[in-house]
Amino acid sequence: MPRTSKLFVSASLISVVLALAACKDEPSAKPELPLEPEPAPAPAPEPEPEPKPTTSAAATAMAE
């Protein structure tokens, strides 16, 4: 790796670290995020297949 790219990577890392440190020192305008991630929305329930009437259920329906 050429020396110039190593210097560029080092300078980039230092600037990122300094930016993060500056962000931590300033009071943030945003409310603090909860430590626990929000629960993901539950997937939509699949529609249940309609139950097929059994012979006893059909006989009960006819008897009524």
Image (tube, grey):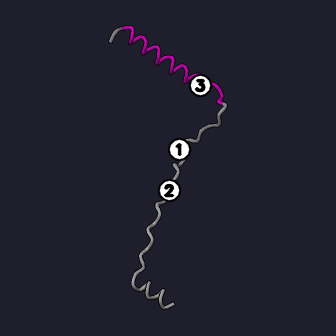
| Residue under the image location 42 percent in, 10 percent down | 7
Between marks 1 and 3, how big is the CA–CA gap?
21 Å
In the picture, the disc for residue 29 is none
Q: Predominant secondary structure in magenta?
A: helix
Three-letter code, disc 2: Ala
Q: Mark 1 is on which residue type? A: Pro
The range drawn in magenta is 3-28
Identify residue for label 1. 37
Q: Which residue is mark 2?
A: 44
Q: Which is in the foreground here, disc 2 or disc 3?
A: 2
Marks 2/1: CA distance?
20 Å
Q: How far apart are the alpha carbons under marks 2 and 3?
A: 39 Å
Mark positioned earlier in the residue sequence (2 or 1): 1
Q: Which of the two labelled residues, at mark 2 and mark 3, occupies the earlier sequence position?
A: 3
- The residue at the point 39 percent across, 11 percent down is 5
Residue 23 on the magenta segment? yes
Mark 2 is surrounded, within 10 Å at the Cα level, by few (under 14), some (14 to 19) or many (20 or more) other residues, namely few
Q: Nearer the viewer, mark 2 or mark 1?
A: 2
Q: Residues within 10 Å of mark 1 (few under 14, many from 20)?
A: few
Asked if the residues shown at circle 2 and circle 3 are in contact, with their CB atoms under 8 angstroms apart, the answer is no
- Which residue position is annotated with label 3? 23
Vertical relation: 49 (above or below) 53: above
Q: Which image quadrant is residue 26 in? A: top right
Viewer-proximal residue among 35 and 40: 40
